[in-house]
Image (cartoon, grey):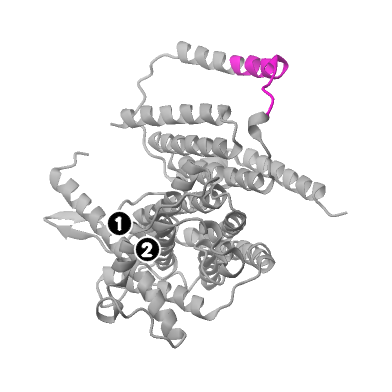
Amino acid sequence: MEQAIFYILAAVTVIGTILAITEKHPVHAILFLVTSLFSMAVIFYLLMAPLVAAFEVILYAGAIMVLFLFVIMMLDLGHPEKGMSPGWKEWLPAVLLSGISIGSLALVIVSRHAVSSAPAVMPTIRELAVSLFREHGLAVELISLQLLFALVGALYLGRQK
Amino acid sequence: MTASSLDIALFSAKLGVVFFVILTLAAYLVFAERKILAWIQDRKGPNRVGPFGLLQPLADLIKLLTKEDFVPASADKWLFYLAPAMAAIPAILIFAVIPFGATLTIFGRPLPLVVTDLNVGLLFFLALSSIAVYGVALGGWASNSKYALLGGIRGLAQMISYELSMGLSLVPVVMLARSFSLTDIVAAQASVPFVVYQPLAFIIFLVSITAECKRIPFDLPEAEGELVAGFHAEYSGMRFGLFFVGEYINIIVLGGLAATFFLGGWHGPLLPPVVWFSVKTLAFAFFFIWMRGTLPRLRYDQLMHLGWKLLTPLALINILVTGWWLALNR
């Protein structure tokens, strides 16, 4: 049952992402991306990470994509169909980099031995919070500082002269 | 866990009852709104169809279903078709995590009166309410009309602004209940409802949910005077009806959530729990209608200033004070 749901969701995620890249109309592309993020959230839930699933929807599908949509609706982007298709100078670095990451992923999968892990238990939010803020407290603080820098930078760039 | 056929039957019956009650209640809320507004404005309101006009929602439904389903020539057809569903479905899905009564025992089996008790129930609500934005924004955009587009953009900006203060006003509730599960939040209010400890968070939440369901005084996305009907100006028939019913389902669900987070959910003396929950939820619905009959609409800049410069900072200070208070009273 869970496996069937996983394969359906995985197919939706992959197809949604491919359509998001190939679709030329920005609003449609955003919708495909939202679909793929949404099914990814359900996959996270199946992997017993309900908190990650919720944040995936709240932050990525609900906030960031909505802001993208807002910007596209505010700026009239004209005729996306007439855009130039990228030449080899644009796509070669992308193919090289993604080739490296896909290759290393394949290596990891091939070299991994089947480990009979203990049945997974759904961790409570409290356990997650304790491990996040006790063991990785410094990293969390550093990331939040980085976000603050980005915020101050945006304010500086957008200030009225 | 093996689910017997009795369990499945009980669960399906529960789902059916929940769907039926919410949809009927939404239809009759439209009727109640028209009656109460008429009462506030010293009119009679709908009184022709059936005794006291009680069959009016049914007549409205037949009218909406038999109307022409019109799509503007230059509209984005598929998004135009999908947008009303995207607005209505998240609203009804949120009800899945609201506990509406104490656990019953039927045929010797416990039947919890909540569709599903997620341990991240509160985040589930926030996630779905952030998805509900798409229906409004895309409905306005796909219509390919200037009024609808302006309404859609306004709706988008308003809903993402007030989502922030809504989410922040719920943080103290989680701090007090020490859980994201709505069942646990209700259980934590068995003796004292959270509104006693968190009056400020309650007010911020109430203002934010009014903005979230786009009701007067925050109905700028559909301001009739300037935008015809805003994001759903180009919709007709049952597609318009879905937007409309979605708004009233939203009122019921958000009223139920306000009752769950701050007024102790189904807890109450004497009366059975389900009755208490309904009374609290409908009281919020009445409050929304009452506001519509009383308050004027805000200007757009006033709306943004209220959200970003008043409610959000207040909610943040409230979280800080609650944290200190909890640390000192440990």
The residue depicted at 53 percent of the width and 35 percent of the height is A33
Q: Amino acid type of disc 2?
A: Val
The residue depicted at 28 percent of the width and 76 percent of the height is B49
In the image, is residue B308 part of the stretch drawn in magenta? Answer: no
Whether discs 1 and 2 lie on one chain: the answer is yes
Point out residue A11 in the picture as x, y percentages from the top left corner: 42, 27
- In this figure, what is the number of numbered marks? 2
What element does badge 2 sit on?
A: helix
- Residue A128 seen in the current view: no
Q: Is residue A148 above or below residue B114?
A: above
Q: Which residue position is annotated with label 2?
A: B186
Report the chain holding disc 2.
B
Q: Which residues are magenta?
A: A83-99
Judging depth in this view, the residue of B329 and B283 nearest the camera is B283
Pointer 1: residues within 10 angstroms few (<14), some, or many (20+)? Answer: many
Distance from the alpha carbon under mark 1 to that under mark 2: 12 Å
Q: Which SS does the magenta portion mostly show?
A: helix
Q: Nearer the viewer, mark 1 or mark 2?
A: 1
The mark found on residue B114 in the picture is 1
Q: Is residue B162 above or below residue B285?
A: above
Q: Amino acid type of disc 1?
A: Val
Residue A112 figure quarter: top left
Of callouts 1 and 2, the N-terminal one? 1
Point out residue A143 in the picture as x, y percentages from the top left corner: 66, 40
Report the chain holding disc 1.
B
What element does badge 1 sit on?
A: loop
Mark 1 vs 2: CB contact within 8 A = no
The mark found on residue A153 in the picture is none
In the image, is residue A91 part of the stretch drawn in magenta? Answer: yes
